[in-house]
Amino acid sequence: MRTYRKLSTIAAAATVAGGLALTGTSAASTGTGGSTARPSGASAGGTVLGVTTGVSDAAPVAYNYKTQYLTQNPVDSMGTSCVDRPIQLAAGNYNWAQFLGGAVDIVRPNFYLGAGRYTWTDCLDPKDGYYVQTTWLNPDNPNWPTASASGPWTLYSSGNFTWGSYLDPLFSSSSAEEKAPDHPSASSPQAERRGG
């Protein structure tokens, strides 16, 4: 069973932390990638990114995302769009979710990841009338398999959309590597998982 949640719930958690200053960074070829946000006065250089919540010991949520124009009626011949980033993760269980246009689908709930560095990639592949989003976490450790999740999305309209995935740690920040917030803007859901 898939669990859906509005993205505005996620962004609301970012505002609870207060005092965050967002600074933009450019990413992959089309659209805009995730912007790095950190508390005022914090130094750059962290790779574990996320939104801090109102709970002082909660570990941060990490995001990999992109904002770009998407048509409501894609066709299979359109190009695939991707965004990726390196990330250093603490060992533990995470809720791994995909999001698009304010809709969220937890695709791998309570998913265990070992401590280490990963390459995190999200791709959106247009099909005839819908998109398929695939997310990968490729560990630098050659003894570990690449983890992936995939699912289809249908848009309600054409326009600029933020899409990607997040990792929500199910453990306290005392075991997290770093606390540098990073989050996409919230909006009303403009997409839903394609039935099937």
Image (tube, helix red, strand yellow):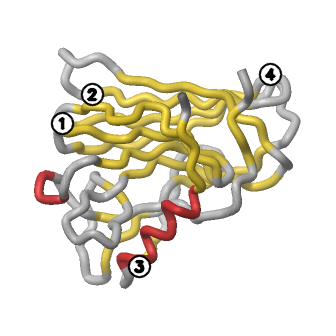
Which residue is more in the foreground, 93 or 41?
A: 93
Which comes before the other along the chain, label 4 or label 1?
A: 4
Which residue is more in the foreground, 33 or 55?
A: 55
Indicate the quadrant containing the C terminus: top left, top right, bottom left or bottom right: top right
Indicate the position of residue 35 as horizontal and vertical percent values: 47, 62
Tell me the distance, in whole angstroms, between the alpha carbons under discs 3 and 2.
30 Å
Q: Secondary structure at mark 4?
A: loop
Question: Dot 4 surroundings within 10 Å: few (below 14), some, or many (20 or more)?
Answer: few
Q: Secondary structure at mark 3?
A: strand
Furthest toward the left, the residue is: 174
Q: Which residue is mark 3?
A: 21
Which comes before the other along the chain, label 4 or label 2?
A: 4
Q: Which residue is mark 4?
A: 76
Question: Dot 2 surroundings within 10 Å: few (below 14), some, or many (20 or more)?
Answer: many
Tell me the distance, in whole angstroms, between the alpha carbons under discs 2 and 1.
7 Å
Q: Which residue is mark 1?
A: 116
Kind of residue at badge 4:
Asp
Indicate the position of residue 36 as horizontal and vertical percent values: 41, 64
Indicate the position of residue 9 as horizontal and vertical percent values: 52, 62
Q: Residue at x 31, y 77 (%)?
A: 39
Residue contact between numbered discs 2 and 1, judged by CB atoms under 8 Å: yes
